[in-house]
Image (spheres, rainbow, N blue to C red):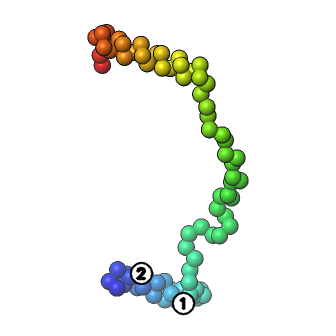
Amino acid sequence: MELLRPLRRYTRLEQQIAVVLGGEVQASKRRGRPPGTGAKPKPAKKKKGKRKMSAEGRARIVEAQRKRWAAVKKGKGKKK
């Protein structure tokens, strides 16, 4: 594979440098964050119930919308 050639060459050079400097050659080098140092999982939250609108609140919204549409139909609607 053509894409892996530079990586293999880099690994080979790294091993040769380690030998020249007297260090140990590691067969598989760990990269990234060490295991066990990440954020700890948060406990699952209790699922809240679905919000419910009262009949009175719904009626107020319906009435307000009817007034808006009546104003639009009369031509008094707000223009943007």
Q: Nearer the viewer, residue 63 or 79?
A: 63
Q: Residues within 10 Å of mark 2 (few under 14, many from 20)?
A: few
Q: Where does residue 57 sit, x and y in percent of width and height? A: 57, 21
* Numbered marks: total: 2
SS label for mark 2 = helix
Q: Where does residue 47 sit, x and y in percent of width and height? A: 67, 45
Q: Where does residue 80 sit, x and y in percent of width and height? A: 30, 19
The quarter of the picture where residue 27 lies is bottom right
In screen coordinates, is 10 left or right of 45?
left
In screen coordinates, is 40 left or right of 63?
right
Can residue 8 be spotted in the picture? Answer: yes
> Which disc, if any, is residue 7?
2
> Which disc, if any, is residue 19?
1
Three-letter amino acid code at disc 1? Answer: Val
Q: CA distance from mark 1 to mark 2?
A: 19 Å
The quarter of the picture where residue 75 lies is top left
Q: Residue at x 48, y 15 (%)?
A: 63
The quarter of the picture where residue 21 lies is bottom right
Q: Earlier in the sequence, mark 1 or mark 2?
A: 2
